[in-house]
Image: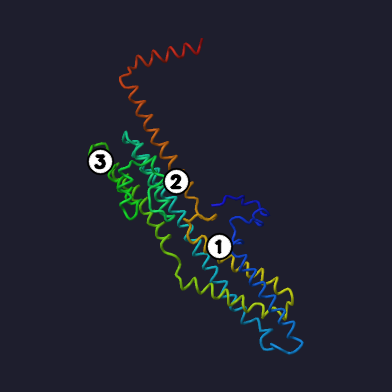
Amino acid sequence: MIEYNRYSWWKTTFSWRGTALSRVAGRVLLFTCYACIVQLAYNAGVGFGLFEHVFGIDPVAHSVLGSLLGFLIVFRMNASNARFWEGRSSWGQIINSSRNLVRVGSEYSNEGQELAGLVTGYVICLRRSLQGLRDTEETELYLSDDVRECAETFGNPPTGITAAITSWIAEKYRAGVFDAVVLRQLEESLSKIVDAQGACEKIQKTPLPFVYVVMVKQLIVAYLLTLPVVLCERCGWWSPVLMTVVSLGLFGMEEASVEIEDPFGTDHNCLDMQAFTLTIARDAGQLARRSVKRAMKVESTAGYSPSDFHHSSTTSYESVQQ
């Protein structure tokens, strides 16, 4: 995902990286050349009475087609944007539920670092799975060899890691570390993570219907093929310029919709899932270390009498006074 200054109007307007210009430039150039050919044909044939039934078509019918096309493209963009936002919301749910899972699990047990490793390994594996990589690479620092081998036997490796997290929770519950209330809270957090994973996979594996996508592309081509015929008599050599602007708008909006339809790829405008996984790894690690430090502090103060505390406090106070 590209970070940009929303208040920098000129810099954003003339950007090239991350825009649809690089993808539609060839198509725009092709239809501009086509408009030039149509204008040449009109100028060559107007003096001889040729093509009199072709050029100068009444623009009313053409404008109706343009209105319909505009409606379809707007609907296409809204559908793609809804998928993009749903993907971002799902990852927000994964981040929040991961924090809650590690926070509660590490606070009520002495093995929070193991849970933090499982959660971090899970989100890394999920990111790779959404990008079409069905393996457990990049998780060597967080997952044990047994967990990684077990996850790779699953058709969906992240599901295998969630099973390992459930086993970790169940083990602590059977050992008496967690009571029923903590168990329920941990399972609710894990269930929310799995639900968000399912939402992401729904977006990834369910593109917009082919029949609708094809219809939009066909109408764009039909509209642009007939546009120079409508403009050549009224606009003259300005018609290729208008063709460039109109084709850039139509192709650009359609291509932008295609790019954000799948927000889990590696394009410039896809979600920065690398940053999401780093955020979860950082927060999970810090929550686990906090619980370890708290446990060490409790152990170090065990058996520490109030008189000793009073003596040490008095000594510290006198040293500061001196």
Q: Which residue is mark 3?
A: 171
Of callouts 2 and 1, the N-terminal one: 1
The residue pinned by badge 1 equals 256
Badge 1 local density, few (<14 within 10 Å), some, or many (20+)? Answer: many
**Seen from this angle, which residue lies furthest right?**
47
List x then y, in percent, for residue 227: 64, 77
Q: Nearer the viewer, residue 155 or 306?
A: 155
| Residue type indicated by callout 2 | Thr
Q: Earlier in the sequence, mark 1 or mark 3?
A: 3
Q: From this view, report whether residue 314 is shown above or below residue 266.
A: above
Give the Cα distance between marks 2 and 1: 26 Å
Q: For the residue marked with disc 3, what is the amino acid?
A: Glu
Name the mark on residue 277. Answer: 2
Tell me: 129 left or right of 213. Answer: left
Label pair 2/3, CB-CB below 8 angstroms: no
The residue under label 1 is which amino acid type?
Ala
- Drawn side of residue 301 relative to residue 57, left or right: left
Secondary structure at badge 2 equals helix
Residue 177 to residue 72: above or below: above
Direction from residue 156 to residue 211 in the image, left or right: right
- Residue drawn where x is 74% and y is 75% of the image: 237
Q: Position of residue 73 (x, y in %)?
A: 55, 69
**Vertical side of 239 occupied by 312: above or below:** above
Q: Nearer the viewer, residue 290 or 125?
A: 125
Q: Residues within 10 Å of mark 3 (few under 14, many from 20)?
A: few
